[in-house]
Amino acid sequence: MDNFKQNYKRSFYLSGDRKKYWYSAFFLGFFVSLILIGLKPFEKSIIDHPYITLVHIGVGLICTAVYILGYEILLRWFKTIKFNYLKLILFDVFLALVSVTLIFLYDRYVVVKDGHVTFGFLLEYILVLGLPFYPVILSIFHFLKTVVFPIQVYAPISKEYLADAENILSIKEDNGAAGFSTNLEQLLYIQSQDNYIEIHYLKDGDYTKHLMRGTLKRILNDFAFLLKVHRSFVVNPHKVECLVGNSNKAAISFKGVAVSVPVSKSYYSSVKNYLSTSTKI
């Protein structure tokens, strides 16, 4: 339970990979329409309309549009703000309230066309229809963006990830045994090679590397501020010189050494966004 709370309170920067938010929002709208059409939870209590299926599809499209617009605003205006999953859930709740309000107006002005709009009627609409229905919708959306289309989130650097005040990273073997230590300012990147990891770093100004047993998954669990740019590479973002190329062929170069690592297409957008907002040592 404590680990669950820590993970949901851990700060990170939002991903810039908009496609994943769009996919999640489209599937959310699809599920909303599917639930309304298939289960008909509110049909008797809302309206009796000859084109009720189209009405339900319209409700799904409203949900899709609200979540796409909401996250576009979040990514454009607040991309430098630290977030956590709890804050994102609260943001989703806010978008849910916006959705219910727009669905209410859609019902009154487009479907029923009676124009009966008051604050009390809206509040009743939210409590009677939105409150029991939207926890399911929020759960679906949270599942989509964290499991089905997982957003890339990168933690800001913090002392909690470091071994001591000297900025020393102690990387252990998978069995827990002492493995390798280096100063954070000297670490460049880590590459996965089957059951081994190859640590690339600077030693007395010279580029060198160290091979040991381990996995990138373990590395990212221990040092969440490291940046995954490829399924086989994680980099120290504070040693990155620049990101060159485009989404089809990109690479990262490092300060003080003539080496580079590839950036895969699936990570390009989020890596580019993170490097444009992250702080340096």
Image (tube, rainbow, N blue to C red):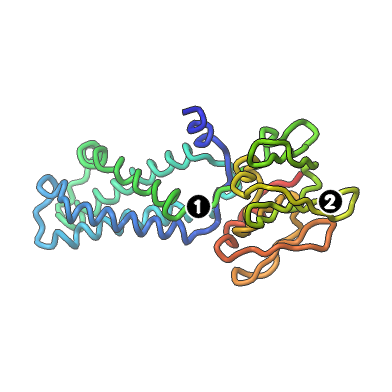
Residue 236 percent across, percent down from the top left: 71, 50
Q: Position of residue 54 (x, y in %)?
A: 19, 62
Q: What mark, if any, has residue 151 been given in the picture? A: 1
- Numbered circle sitting on residue 202: 2
Give the residue type that dot 1 points to: Ile
- Whole-number angstrom distance, CA of label 2 to CA of label 1: 32 Å
Badge 2 or badge 1: first in the primary sequence: 1
Q: Report the front residue among 256 and 127.
A: 256
Count of all numbered marks drawn on residues in the image: 2
On the rendered structure, is 145 left or right of 176?
left
User: Eyeballing the image, is 93 above or below 110?
Assistant: above
Identity of the residue drawn at 23% across and 56% down: 34
Q: Residue furthest top?
A: 2
How crowded pointer 1 is (Cα within 10 Å; few <14, some 14-19, many 20+) is rated as many
- Quadrant for residue 110, please give it: bottom left
Q: Residue furthest bottom?
A: 248
